[in-house]
Amino acid sequence: MRILATLACSIVLAAAPAFSQQLAATPPMGWNSWNHFAGHVTDEDVRSAADTLVNTGMRDAGYIYVNVDDTWQGQRDAQGVLHPNDRFPDMKALADYVHTKGLKFGIYSSPGAKTCGGYAGSLDHEAEDAKMYAAWGVDFLKYDLCSFQSNMNKAKADHPNDPNAARDLMIAAYKKMGDALKATGRPIVYSLCQYGVDQPWKWGPSVGAQMWRTTDDIDDSYGRMVTIGFSQAGLSKYAGPGHWNDPDMLEVGNGKMTEDEYKTHMSLWVLLAAPLLAGNDLSKMTDTDKSILMNKDAIAIDQDLLGKQGDRLYQSGDLDVWTKPLSGGRVAVGLFNRSWDNRDVSVNLADIGFKNGANLRDVWKQQDLGHRKGVFTDTIPKHGVTLLIVSK
């Protein structure tokens, strides 16, 4: 867990298998165990998360994937079959339980011999692991580069005159698992976790992926979150139905940011049409956590069927304005204040296609602001945001 429309891109996207376009038609939403539980996650934790997604209304809001991250693996037997460790006594039974809740089940592996946590990866076992996932009822695979980087370093050393040796080896490894997943016949969302190495947004669809990490890992801090979020400027042309840029999971509810900072986090991610994978302890959510994660207007921006990723309109010092085209001629607008003081942030409605004015809705205040013309200005608290839906 580490680092980080051209014609070429259009060709790559066109090469993506048709069945992948039917997966992740909108950015996947759900929960992942890593950010809170890390290497201590258990079968009981995952079942509890599934229960809570239902009981809180998160499932009905769109959070349907329940994803077990690293450290579930045990040992391979003499036939090469990988068994879960004693914290996960029956993975098929766990997947079945998740499915009975109207949810989907996700799992984690690596193209390397080991995962980030030092557990068994899928190197040289791609086909049998994919078959095993399908037999368990897996709906989502996160595939983490980790130890495969040593293979890439060796390729680089063995082929000093080939600048693409490591890149080509990595792409081949990801394609091998992508092909294996496809061969199972089960629709499994394929998520590349390789920190943006060698621009996966340009080749991810060609290996069968529906989403790919564009950055190094997030953590529960404002500085790290905004560094990742605002670094996504310029990537919008690579996203769309069935293929999404992934700036990593959500930290909302983990407790180290303020309410305004978490609203900034959620606002950025929905404008980016990012996968929304909650990473908190769902059993300990506050009302504020729930109001941010389950804000219907914010989720609707992320899940809009037009499938467009947003991008930066302009930046002035610590002030940013981002926009995202929405279906029906609407536009989502984020006014961001990264400074340490309250600041006025403005957007000229004519600059986003509304020269005759528009109707504005404030997402976080959950208020209709009426019809406005010209320049809209709002006073935004430090590290805060105003998120708008603008319509004719």
Image (tube, rainbow, N blue to C red):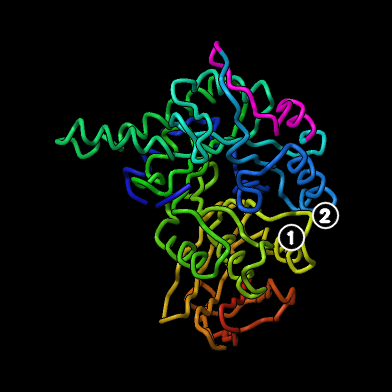
Q: In which quarter of the view is residue 299 placed?
A: bottom right
Asked if residue 377 is positioned above or below residue 176 in the image, the reply reads: below
Which label is found at residue 121?
none
* Few, some or many residues within 10 Å of mark 1 (<14, 14–19, 20+): some
- Residue type (three-letter) at the residue carrying disc 2: Thr
**Foreground residue among 159 and 378:** 159
Q: Quadrant of the C terminus?
A: bottom right
Asked if residue 75 is positioned above or below residue 69 in the image, the reply reads: above
Foreground mark, 1 or 2, reads 2
**Is label 2 in a helix, a strand or a loop?**
loop
Q: Is residue 304 left or right of residue 368?
A: left
User: Which residue shows up at 41% across the image and 81% down it?
Assistant: 316
Assess whether mark 2 and mark 1 are in contact (beta carbons under 8 angstroms): yes
Asked if residue 102 is positioned above or below residue 387 in the image, the reply reads: above
Q: Give percent across and percent down for residue 124.
A: 44, 21
Is residue 391 in sight in this rendering?
Answer: no
Q: Is residue 156 left or right of residue 62?
A: left
Give, as a single range, the part of the protein colored magenta: 78-97
Q: Which residue is mark 1?
A: 294
- Farthest residue, direction top: 79
**Foreground residue among 346 and 175:** 175
Q: In which quarter of the view is residue 160 placed?
A: top left
- Residue type (three-letter) at the residue carrying disc 1: Met
Q: Is residue 316 inside the magenta stretch?
A: no
Q: Which residue is mark 2?
A: 56
